[in-house]
Amino acid sequence: MRELLARLDGWQGEQIEFLGRLVNHDSGTDDVLDVNRVGAILAERLASLGFTVSRVAQEHFGDHLVAEKPGRGPRRFLFVGHFDTVFPSGTVKERPFHVAGGRAYGPGVYDMKGGLTALLYALRAHRETRSRAWDDVSIAIVFNSDEERLSPTSRAVIETQARRAHSVGILEPARPGGEYVMARKGAGVFRLEVTGKSSHAGLQPELGASAIWDLAQKVAELHTLTSSDTGTTVNVGVIRGGTRPNVIADRAAADIDLRVWTTEEAARATARMREICERVRVPGTAGRFTGAIQFPPWPPGDPGTARLLEIMQATGRDLGVEVKAIATGGGSDGNHTSQLAPTIDGLGPQGSRAHSEEEFIELATLLERTKMIAGFLERWAAEFEVPRG
Ligand SMILES: [Zn+2]
């Protein structure tokens, strides 16, 4: 173990340079050519580590990468990370990778090119020291290109791999306090569309049926479903409707975000939302409610996750790092994998301000998290009990 970790100290400068190279290539989800360029850098790295890399070709997104390396033992571990960002082509030109005051900045440095870099160097240390994990464990990696659009095309790829794996590590960044992630709320996007009847607001108001007035009352009621007791949140984030002040609106629509901790709560809250949206408040209008939960809940207290956290905590003791974990309302591909295999999330470096111009990582935690991944994998190879059969 000591040799494994010492190897990483020697690569610190090179590792930061590699992170800079990843960050300095834009890879906004919708810019397919950009995304594929970053995919090519990652594929080349994985191949040089001895992985068999296949590209899962996509039409509207960059190609996903699936990499595999067989091990001699029965254990199989899956790592998942996305290499798309929320920043469009040209962002790097405006604010390229740079380091200041112990922090590294640049588009996607925290979410999540830092996590990808940490994994690649952790695996390199395993390979070069011929660690137990490297010999024994079959390692699979999915690097997906569409996570910032909620993984519409990679979800099935990830699920196929998660089904075969005994545990999954998600390379999303650590929370701002350095915490790992052990639970995530389920999330769904819903839409309410109200149709009414237009009429002159001054001449013949009685002939109209205002879709806006109906929608407004429903929006107010939808927001009362948010509860600090259950942790359920309902947020109407977008409303549209009407044409002019002097026309009674015949159309209005709302986009609604729902977050829940459990599957039962998802069903209950969705049923309540439907009831609210379909009940007529303004005579002559009709409401249509559509949508579904896209990210299933990964509730707190998952025993598989708890086991992985124990192994991470033991790794932290090896390294003198305090391991904390939290539950969060934000979704990730961990929501999907946790349904199929024990999952731990937030393996990437510590930082903050994801999806903003101020995004950064605490640079020292790049090496620290790389060591944590490397040490965790070695302990997992020795300690994780693989179910029989
Ligand atoms: Zn992310």
Image (cartoon, helix red, strand yellow):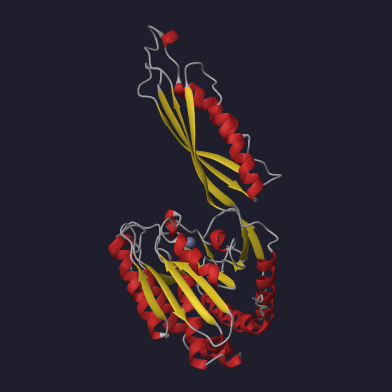
Hey, which residue is sitting farthest left in the picture? Answer: 33
The part of the image, by quadrant, that contains residue 208 is top left
- Residue drawn at 53 percent across, 73 percent down: 78
**Number of numbered markers:** 0
The part of the image, by quadrant, that contains residue 54 is bottom left
Q: Where residue 146 sits: x, y (%)?
A: 40, 59
Classify the position of the N terminus by image quarter.
bottom right
58 left or right of 183 in image? left
Classify the position of the C terminus by image quarter.
bottom right
- 181 vs 67: above or below: above
- 49 vs 290: above or below: below
- 103 vs 381: above or below: above
Residue 2 appears in the figure: yes
- Residue drawn at 35 percent across, 63 percent down: 27
Q: Where residue 337 sits: x, y (%)?
A: 55, 63
- Residue drawn at 56 percent across, 34 percent down: 274
Between 22 and 213, the residue placed more toward the observer is 213
Q: Where residue 139 sits: x, y (%)?
A: 51, 79
Between 294 and 172, the residue placed more toward the observer is 294
Q: Where residue 269 sits: x, y (%)?
A: 62, 40
- 99 vs 191: above or below: below
Hey, which residue is sitting farthest top in the picture? Answer: 203
Residue 101 appears in the figure: no
Hey, which residue is sitting farthest front in the picture? Answer: 389
